[in-house]
Image (cartoon, rainbow, N blue to C red):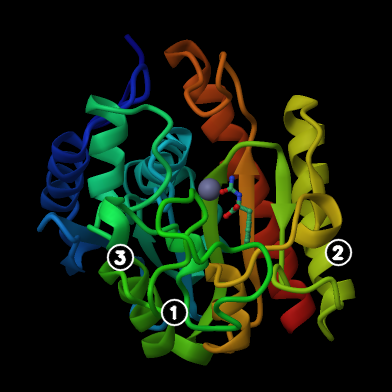
C-alpha cells in the first residue's frame, strides 16, 4: 500500500485515526507544528487543528478547513494530504508557501463523519437533537452572516436546515471564532467540500457581485487552470448562485463578510463512485492531489493581487 510518511490514503480514515495521525506528526516534527484543540463537538469529540509554522515572522496565516459535511469523505483526506506535505515533505514545499503560517482543521464535523461511516453514508449535517425529533444542522448554513436567507431551510428535518439561531452549533461557531480571532492576519481561507469540481467564492447568499468579484474570479480561474494543466481535470470558477445555487449562512460569506478576510474559497473536489461523495479508495489520492494543486496556485495568485 502507498504510505505517505505517517499517513496513507488508500482508504478513508476514521475520527480516531485522523487524530492519532495529527498527534504522531506533531510529535515527530515538534519544531514545525503543534495541535490546537479548538473545542468539542455536540457529542463531545475534540475538534483539532494543526498549526504549522516554519518561521517566527510569517507573512500571514492561511486557514484550511475540511469535513464540514459528513458524507464528503474526500474533504478531510485532502486536508490531511496538505498537512502531510507541509510537515512531512517540508523539503519539497515551495519556499514561498513556507513564508505563511498554516492552520489546518481537517474534520470540522466529527459527529456527522462518524455517523456517515457507521450508520448512514449520505448523512450531511451535524448530529445535535432538534425540535420535531430530527437530528443535525447544516453547518454551512449556520454561520452568522446573512443567516436565514436564500438556499437554507428553517425545517429541522431538512438537509439544509440552518439551525434555530446563527452559530447554534458549536462546530460552526468554532470556525467563526477562529476567523474572528485572526481577521486581517489571515489572508486566505479555504473550506474543502466535495463534490462537483468547482472553485466557489463569495457571495453565496446573493447573486449580487461582491466588490472584489473580478479579483476573486481571477484567483479561482488560476486554481482551475493549474489543475487543468497538471491533470486535465476541468474545474469551474464562480459564485455559488451563478454556477450551482444560492446558499446563505456559509463559511466563505462569513469569512469575507464578517471576519474581513480578503479571500475565501470553497473548493468542491472531483466526485467519483456511485454517489460521488465516496470515491473508491483507489481514486482518493488523485482527487486530493488535484485539490492541493489548485489551492497552492490560488494562494500564490492571491498573494500577487494583494501585494
Ligand atoms: N456544496 C456547498 C453547500 O454548502 C456552497 C456549496 C459553497 C454553498 C459555498 C455556500 C457557500 O451546499 C456542498 N457540496 O456542500
Ligand atoms: Zn459540502
Q: Nearer the viewer, mark 2 or mark 1?
A: 2
List x then y, in percent, for residue 283: 53, 17
Tell me how far mark 3 sits from mark 1, CA to CA.
27 Å
Can you say whether 89 is above or below 103 in the image? Answer: above
User: In the rendered picture of this protein, how many numbered marks are placed on residues?
Assistant: 3
Mark toward the start of the polypeptide (2 vs 3):
3
Q: Residue at x 70, y 72 (%)?
A: 205
Question: Mark 2: few, some, or many residues within 10 Å (few <14, many ≥20)?
Answer: some
CB-based contact (under 8 Å), mark 2 and mark 3: no
Question: Would you say 84 lies left or right of 72 here?
Answer: left
Q: Secondary structure at mark 2?
A: helix
Mark toward the start of the polypeptide (3 vs 1):
1
Tell me how far mark 2 sits from mark 1, CA to CA.
25 Å
Mark toward the start of the polypeptide (2 vs 1):
1
Quadrant location, ligand no. 1: bottom right
Residue linked to disc 1: 58
**Occupied quadrant, residue 241:** bottom right
Q: Secondary structure at mark 1?
A: loop
Q: Quadrant of the C terminus?
A: bottom right
Residue linked to disc 2: 218
Residue linked to disc 3: 171
Amino acid at each position: 500500500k502507498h504510505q505517505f510518511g505517517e499517513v496513507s490514503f488508500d482508504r478513508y480514515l476514521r475520527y480516531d485515526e485522523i487524530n492519532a495521525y495529527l498527534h504522531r506528526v506533531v510529535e515527530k516534527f515538534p519544531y514545525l507544528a503543534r495541535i490546537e484543540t479548538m473545542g468539542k463537538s455536540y457529542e463531545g469529540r475534540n475538534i483539532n487543528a494543526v498549526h504549522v509554522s516554519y518561521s517566527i515572522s510569517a507573512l500571514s496565516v492561511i486557514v484550511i478547513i475540511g469535513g464540514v459535511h459528513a458524507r464528503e469523505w474526500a474533504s478531510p483526506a485532502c486536508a490531511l494530504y496538505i498537512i502531510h506535505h507541509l510537515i512531512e515533505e517540508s523539503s519539497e514545499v515551495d519556499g514561498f508557501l513556507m513564508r505563511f503560517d498554516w492552520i489546518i482543521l481537517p474534520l470540522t464535523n466529527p459527529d456527522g463523519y462518524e455517523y456517515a461511516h457507521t450508520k448512514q453514508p449520505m448523512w450531511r449535517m451535524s448530529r445535535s437533537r432538534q425540535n420535531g425529533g430530527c437530528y443535525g444542522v447544516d453547518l454551512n448554513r449556520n454561520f452568522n452572516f446573512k443567516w436565514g436567507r436564500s438556499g437554507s431551510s428553517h425545517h429541522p428535518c431538512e438537509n439544509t436546515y440552518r439551525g434555530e439561531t446563527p452559530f447554534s452549533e458549536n462546530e460552526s461557531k468554532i470556525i467563526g471564532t477562529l476567523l474572528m480571532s485572526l481577521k486581517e492576519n489571515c489572508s486566505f481561507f479555504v473550506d474543502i467540500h466535495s463534490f462537483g469540481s468547482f472553485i466557489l467564492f463569495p457571495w453565496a447568499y446573493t447573486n449580487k457581485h461582491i466588490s472584489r468579484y473580478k479579483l476573486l474570479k481571477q484567483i479561482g480561474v488560476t486554481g482551475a487552470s493549474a489543475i487543468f494543466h497538471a491533470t486535465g481535470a476541468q474545474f469551474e470558477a464562480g459564485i455559488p448562485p451563478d454556477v450551482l445555487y444560492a446558499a446563505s449562512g456559509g463559511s466563505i460569506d462569513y469569512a469575507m463578510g464578517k471576519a474581513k478576510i480578503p479571500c475565501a474559497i470553497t473548493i468542491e473536489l472531483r466526485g467519483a463512485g456511485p454517489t460521488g461523495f465516496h470515491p473508491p479508495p483507489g481514486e482518493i489520492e488523485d482527487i486530493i492531489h488535484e485539490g492541493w494543486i489548485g489551492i497552492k496556485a490560488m494562494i500564490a495568485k492571491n498573494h500577487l493581487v494583494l501585494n
